[in-house]
Amino acid sequence: MPKALNDFLGYCIYFWVGDGAEPIHVHVSKGIPTDKATEIWLKADGVEIAHNNSQIPGRDLKEILAFVEENRDDVVLQWLNIFGRAEYTM
């Protein structure tokens, strides 16, 4: 089950509730959550695209990456509220 965090440029940014054992990351898809979503991992030194399964166009993806980076603290806090632990991918 997805936990929506934000809507940005018509894209839904969310966690899957079962992802708590993994390092901090968000899923992104156009309109509604889907299992074919793009994944963006939060790293100790920035953000990184794990894959672009939802085929977000480059310009939008660049803006989404900047948005996630700018809101890193909020993403981490929400991750902690849901999963109770936080670990960055290296």
Image (cartoon, rainbow, N blue to C red):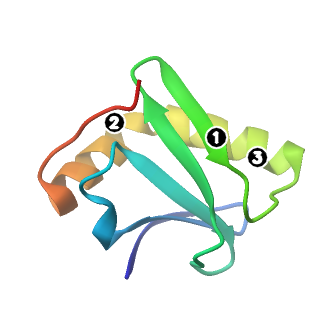
Residue at the left extreme, as displayed: 84
Q: Compute the Cα span from label 1 to label 3.
A: 9 Å
**Label 3 near label 1: C-beta < 8 Å?**
yes
Task: Say which amino acid is labelled 3.
Answer: Leu
Residue at mark 2: 73
Please identify, in this view, whether the residue under mark 2 or under mark 1 is nearer the observer: 1
> In this orientation, which residue lies closer to the viewer: 8 or 23?
23
Q: Compute the Cα span from label 2 to label 3.
A: 20 Å
Q: Going by the image, does 17 lie left or right of 10?
A: left
> In this orientation, which residue lies closer to the viewer: 23 or 32?
23
Circle 3 Cα neighbour tier, 10 Å, few/some/many (<14 / 14–19 / ≥20) = some
- Residue plotted at (59% across, 33% down): 48
- Residue plotted at (80% across, 57% down): 56
**Label 1 near label 2: C-beta < 8 Å?**
no
- Residue plotted at (73% across, 53% down): 52
Residue at mark 3: 61
Task: Say which amino acid is labelled 2.
Answer: Asp
Give percent across and percent down for residue 41.
Answer: 49, 41
Please identify, in this view, whether the residue under mark 1 or under mark 3 is nearer the observer: 1
Q: Going by the image, does 30 lie left or right of 19?
A: right
Give percent across and percent down for residue 1.
Answer: 37, 82
Q: Compute the Cα span from label 2 to label 1.
A: 18 Å
Give percent across and percent down for residue 80.
Answer: 19, 50
**Label 3 near label 2: C-beta < 8 Å?**
no
Please identify, in this view, whether the residue under mark 2 or under mark 3 is nearer the observer: 3
Of callouts 1 and 3, which one flags the residue occurring earlier in the amino acid sequence?
1
Residue at mark 1: 49
Mark 2 secondary-structure assignment: helix
